[in-house]
Image (cartoon, rainbow, N blue to C red):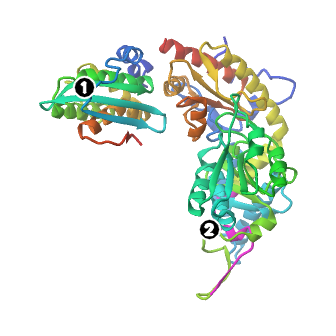
Amino acid sequence: MADLRDLYQDIILEHSKNPRNYRTLETPDRTAEGFNPLCGDHFTVYLQIGDGKIRDISFQGSGCAISKASASMMTQAVKGKSTEQAEELFQKFHHVVTGKDGATSEELGKLAAFSGVSEYPVRVKCATLAWHALRAALEGEQHAVSTE
Amino acid sequence: MTTATNIAQSPKSIGQTGYDVYTIRKDFPILARKIQGKPLVYLDNAATTQKPQAVIDAMVNYYNSENANIHRGVHTLSEQATESYEQARKMIGRFLNSADAREIVFVRGATEGINLVAQTWGRANVGRGDEIVVSAMEHHSNIVPWQILCEEKGARLRVVPVNDAGELMMEEFEKLLGPKTKLVAIAHVSNALGTVNPVRRIVEMAQQYDVRVLIDGAQAVPHLVVDVCALDCDFYVFSGHKVYGPTGIGALYGKAELLDSMPPYQGGGDMISSVTFEKTLYNRAPQKFEAGTPHVSGTIGLAAALQYVNAIGIDRIAKHEQEVLAYGTRRLLEIPGLRLIGTAKEKEGILSFVLEGIHPHDIGTVLDREGIAIRTGHHCAQPLMQRFGVPATARASLGLYNTVEEMDALADGLRKVREVFA
């Protein structure tokens, strides 16, 4: 049986209370919204892109501890990365939180703290909400993405 | 401090009702289950209730020794199945105090009952410029079918607002009634707040304008005496699985003259009296609305559930639940940062709340680790969540088997939630 602390690791609780990059960007190149209608979680991700790289990223919105911490740690993880690297990181992150066979949290760095989510299938959507919004922003989609 | 673990060992009765909840709990096999290694504290009864052995046995027995299709064939099994099915209809009729079992239509649940009325009575009687009145505390199932109808017919949906306690604003309701109003569709008890609406008064007021009234009784039937004759409503719907019966079965009550005047719902077998390619004659109500082979075992399970409830007595169940609700309310209000959503004077066993700075989903996950099952989210009432300015709430909802010790377990669990997110 999974311990509660495997899900709510200290770093996750800390980020949920003090989210990083929690602001709007004044002149974002791209923005996208992520919305989970089932629980009302709602985030907007702001991006500044240059030379194929994520120059700056921020987010705002409301949600549970998992979704907020995930958004916060995502902004730290992808800042300065190329859009391809960010997409690759999302793939790895997604594999780990969904508990895919052969998934490894190596190369995930701090994001490995979310590996406990795989024991809580209904919370996967919380952990990936901001990432889906990021992907939508990178792909230039205008409408809000929904995890439903 | 009382914890969830003493539930089974502490048969101290509450109040003077003589209501032995600890014996009653033994009728529900699932309540003996452990969740996350802890005794199950099931507080999600507004979503669905657990089933007593009597209901499970009735359905197993039907499949073991009675199974056949109904209203067909002259063989013994078919006759027995038909008899059980029609007996179940009578049982439901008596439970709601309807004058005639023909006024009871079997449906999948309250949702289908509402859709049936919208698609039959509604399409025949609602036109351009007409108005349908619902309330701000409706479940989506009592909003969306009317929106679909309004869109098709060019009619308008009007909404009765609720006050900060979660009660209908009756003076606003009165203002919405007028010559354009065709129907009032309103919950008897709110699934998200527990508010008991003054449905008798609503019917009286609507009748002054010759307006039909549909009551969504999904959250009322398990908790209070429903008498459709006394209410004098035109339609009343409920779901079997919320009153200790199986899923996939429920009932629509409709006044006989209304049901007779309504066009059919779905076409198929059983709803006809004769078919030719030139002209089909429809069966009488209620068969007119029951196309295809129905959920026979479900009707038998539902009848067994209502019989079970009757054997305990709905009055005694109501009294017991009110005691647990009052105790639970007191315990929850001791928790710092907790805000109850829904504080109506007349309430059924629902405790909807938010904890300052903690998302309901996180509350739900931590409580689950303690074996406590509650619902978190918008409870299929998004407009109501918007009214109270919250994206979601945590909701503990009571059934006839819940105890004061379980309210203690909930309060202890919420303290643990606060520790985790402190």
Please, what is the three-letter code of the amino acid marked with disc 1? Ser
Residue A87 magenta? no
Chain of the residue on which disc 2 is drawn: B
Question: Residue A23, position in %: x, y?
Answer: 35, 21
Whether residue A66 can be seen here:
yes
The residue drawn where x is 83% and y is 46% is B200
Residue underneath mark 2: B293
Would you identify the image quadrant in which residue B262 lies?
bottom right
Query: Label 1 marks which chain's residue?
Result: A
Residue B129, which numbered label? none
Q: Nearer the viewer, residue A110 or B144?
A: B144
Q: Quarter of the image holding residue B342?
A: top right
Q: Position of residue A142 (x, y in %)?
A: 32, 42
Residue in the picture at 84% in, 53% down: B208
Cα–Cα gap, marks 2 and 1:
52 Å
Element type at marker 1? loop
In the depicted structure, whether residue A81 falls above or below residue B278: above
Q: Is residue B171 left or right of residue B353?
A: right
Quadrant showing the N terminus of chain B:
top right
Q: Which kind of residue does numbered mark 2 sit on?
A: Thr
At mark 2, the secondary structure is loop
Query: At which x and y percent is residue A13?
Result: 40, 16
At 69% from the left edge and 60% from the top edge, which residue is drawn?
B106
Please tell me how crowded label 2 is: few (under 14), some (14-19), or many (20+) other residues with Cα within 10 Å. few
Q: Which residues are magenta?
A: B279-299
Q: Which mark is residue A105?
A: 1
> Is B281 contained in the magenta span?
yes
Provide residue B100's location: percent of width, then percent of height: 84, 63
Please state which of residues B406 and B254 is positioned toward the viewer in this rendering.
B254
